[in-house]
Image (cartoon, rainbow, N blue to C red):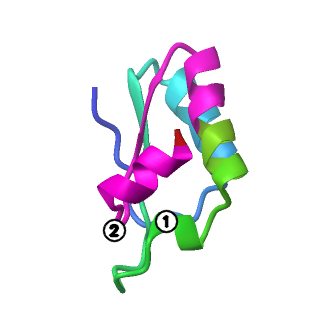
Amino acid sequence: MLISLGCLNIESLNLIDIVYKVDADIVMMDTKIKDGKSTFQFLTDDRLKLFVNRAKDHELSAAIAGSLSVRRCIELE
């Protein structure tokens, strides 16, 4: 099931609750403004890890997008 909330500004952890309540399988976070800045410039590593862990707690897969580099994603692990 794909549910797009478009360009709404929703706090990332609230997004998990919304996706869980509509019985979706995956929650995805992306940057709204496509200016080449990475998601890592808007959210701390701890906040991104919390997003992924909270999604897993709700039995959801988590996806993060927004000008990500492989090297930076590996560093986050």
- At horizontal 42% and vertical 50% (from top left) the residue drawn is 73
Quadrant of the drawing holding the N terminus: top left
- At horizontal 66% and vertical 54% (from top left) the residue drawn is 11
Q: Position of residue 72 (x, y in %)?
A: 44, 58
Tag 2 near tag 1, CB within 8 Å: yes
Q: Mark 1 packing: few (<14 Cα in 10 Å), some, or many (20+)?
A: some
Question: Residue lying furthest top in this view?
Answer: 59
Residue bearing mark 2: 67
28 displayed left or right of 75: left
Residue 70 lies in what quarter of the image?
Answer: bottom left
Q: Position of residue 18 (x, y in %)?
A: 57, 34
Q: Where is residue 76 in the image (x, y as percent from the top left)?
A: 54, 47
Identified by mark 1, the residue type is Thr
Q: Can residue 61 be seen in this view?
A: yes
- Magenta part of the protein: which range? 52-76
Question: Residue lying furthest left in this view?
Answer: 1
64 displayed left or right of 67: right
Q: Can residue 29 be seen in this view?
A: no
Which disc number belongs to residue 24?
A: none
74 displayed left or right of 36: right
Q: Is residue 63 magenta?
A: yes
Q: What element carries label 2?
A: loop
- At horizontal 63% and vertical 28% (from top left) the residue drawn is 53
11 displayed left or right of 77: right
**Please, is residue 62 above or below residue 60 in the view?**
below
Taking depth in this image into account, of 25 and 54 the one nearest to the observer is: 54
Q: Position of residue 24 (x, y in %)?
A: 40, 23
- At horizontal 68% and vertical 60% (from top left) the residue drawn is 44
Q: Does the magenta stretch include residue 66?
A: yes
Residue bearing mark 1: 39
Q: Is mark 1 on a helix, strand or loop?
A: helix
